[in-house]
Image (cartoon, helix red, strand yellow):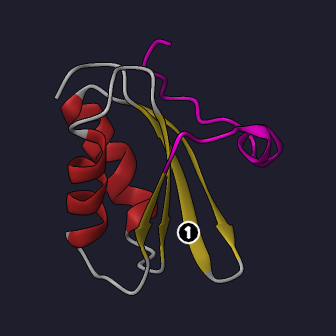
Amino acid sequence: MPQTDAPLSAAELAALEPDLQVDARFTLCPMPIVKTAQALEPQPIGVLARVRATDAGVARDLPAWCRVQGQAFLGCVQENGEWVGYVRKIVAS
């Protein structure tokens, strides 16, 4: 899957079935990104991660990290006071 700058819609994100859950709730920057990087590092290419965070900065930081690392940012939505982002690993760490 190519890297995208056009995130998926909320409905499209809700239909995704992630392979990996990253719980970064109740942590502050930079920990949601650190936890995401650590969780994805040992995974094979193609893995889809759902990242849950309570730090609103993740909505800005996650797509920026994906651009720098070459991973695919699929989108981020707010659900029940949490930010939920989706990342597909498309390059080896």
In-image side of 47 versus 90 (left or right): right
User: What type is the residue that disc 1 sits on?
Assistant: Trp
Q: Position of residue 18 (x, y in %)?
A: 59, 42
Magenta residues span 1-20
Name which residue lies at 68% across and 39% down: 17
Q: Position of residue 42 (x, y in %)?
A: 22, 36
Q: How many marks?
A: 1
- Name above or below for residue 23 compared with residue 80: above
Which sits in the foreground, 50 or 63?
50
- Name above or below for residue 76 compared with residue 58: above
In-image side of 64 versus 19 (left or right): left
59 magenta-colored = no
| Residue for badge 1 | 83
Q: Is disc 1 placed on a helix, strand or loop?
A: strand
- Name above or below for residue 26 compared with residue 17: below
Name which residue lies at 57% across and 61% down: 84
Q: Position of residue 78 (x, y in %)?
A: 65, 68
